[in-house]
Image (spheres, rainbow, N blue to C red):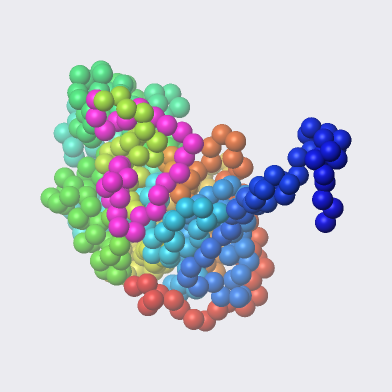
Amino acid sequence: MTTLSRRNLFKAGAGFVPAVALGARPAQAAPVPVVTVSGIAPAALAGFDKVMKTFVTERNISCAQLAIAKKGKILLARGYRYSDGSQALPSVTPTSLFRIASLSKHITATAIMRLVQDGKLSLAAPVTTLLGLSAEADPRLAQVTVLRLMQHLGGWDRNVSKDYLYLDHQISATLDAPLPISQEDIIRYAGARPLDFAPGSRMAYSNYGYMLLGRIVEKVSGTSYESYVKQKLLAPVGITRMRLGRVLRSEAAPTEVVYSSQYTSKTVTDESGTVVPTPYGGFSMANRGAGGGWLASAVDLVRFSRVFDAAGPVLNATSIGRMFAKPEIGVNENGSWYGGGWWVRQVPGNLNTWHDGSLPGTYTYLARLQNGFTYAALFNRREEEGTLDFDVLSPRMNAELNKVTTWPTTDLTSKYF
């Protein structure tokens, strides 16, 4: 190594100051983020594992899960943690809990169908009668039935009148009701306004409609919505981890992941006006409940999906058929339709059903496809300004499905249930 004299150092120029000459430590390379995994991914399904690793790396998603089942057998169960190691973060296991957002909707629709199956409810029953709602602001409200709520045909369009479940501050001010507002406050606010279209005339996705379905489950069953789902839907298929989520990080379930978002919001939990990370106080988890409030793991979701494969302890064949039946408006331009909490499309020999979920700090996807293939993918952040497209997940997974030549025979179900 050449040693520069003090004289030669100055001749080299003021901008050239060798670190060794000044006694400084060599520069440390920045930590490189890596994906660490838990659980099992058989070699035959390694392509799906690679899709997830690539997806979280491209989008800087710190927590994710994937579970794959075929004909009722769980074949892959993975947790993913993407981190540079600079912080001591808990690992993500196949049973860690995530907010599943709108994947909650097929759970609620199943609860409704179970009440119908047990003779306690009619899909044709008007919501005004069931919940004692006034139709004074819009007589057409009397035409909103349970089935129309399930299929998003109730008359509320969030592109016109906004999503009532995100208007906490506006509802609080209008009703002079203190924060946090309740579901009763939301119903009172919505009930004073006209519908956006005639019920049954077209589809518009409505979180408010599913909130009402949760209220119907409580009214008809005589128990809380969460208790009814756990007793009548989850327990019969051995699922014990799932529960409704809470809004604050301090209230998180023991194995729940931490949610990530670049956005902040004024809290909806109290009147303080405090600016908080949007996933933790920017919206109400309690009011989402039936439409977007559940916590689950990916293995829980593929396990519950077995309910729709054939008659069993939760639903009979007639109820399953009614959940997937075409709505009165028929199919859309893509040949698909919205059933009970599922998008549905007829393919040769099979009904493919799927749904996604999205909240600040959450993106989820669940699909039941031909040949008995089911998968659930969960993430602790969603697409935001500046991030790559999240919608590429489904086509990437479908591409891998077409590449599988030999399916594993080992069933992992007993490892998690």
The part of the chain drawn in magenta is: 244-271
Q: Position of residue 39 (x, y in %)?
A: 47, 70
- Between residue 271 and residue 159, name the one nearer to us: 271
In this picture, residue 144 sits left or right of residue 1: left
Whether residue 261 is in magenta: the answer is yes
Q: Is residue 69 above or below residue 157?
A: below
Whether residue 280 is in magenta: the answer is no
Q: Position of residue 196 (x, y in %)?
A: 39, 25
Instruction: Report the residue at 37% width, 72% height from top.
Output: 416
Query: Taken as a whole, is the magenta stretch helix, strand or loop?
Result: loop
Instruction: Report the residue at 78% width, 34% height from top.
Output: 15
- Between residue 67 and residue 216, name the one nearer to us: 67
Q: Which residue appears farthest toward the bottom when viewing the image?
A: 409
Instruction: Report the residue at 59% width, 71% height from top.
Output: 45
Q: Quadrant of the N terminus?
A: bottom right
In this picture, residue 227 sits left or right of residue 99: left
Q: Is residue 297 above or below residue 46?
A: above
In this picture, residue 259 sits left or right of residue 182: right
- Between residue 58 and residue 220, name the one nearer to us: 58
Res 55 visible = no
- Between residue 240 and residue 118, name the one nearer to us: 240
Instruction: Report the residue at 56% width, 48% height from top.
Output: 60
Res 239 visible = yes
Q: Quadrant of residue 92?
A: bottom left
Q: Position of residue 74 (x, y in %)?
A: 46, 72
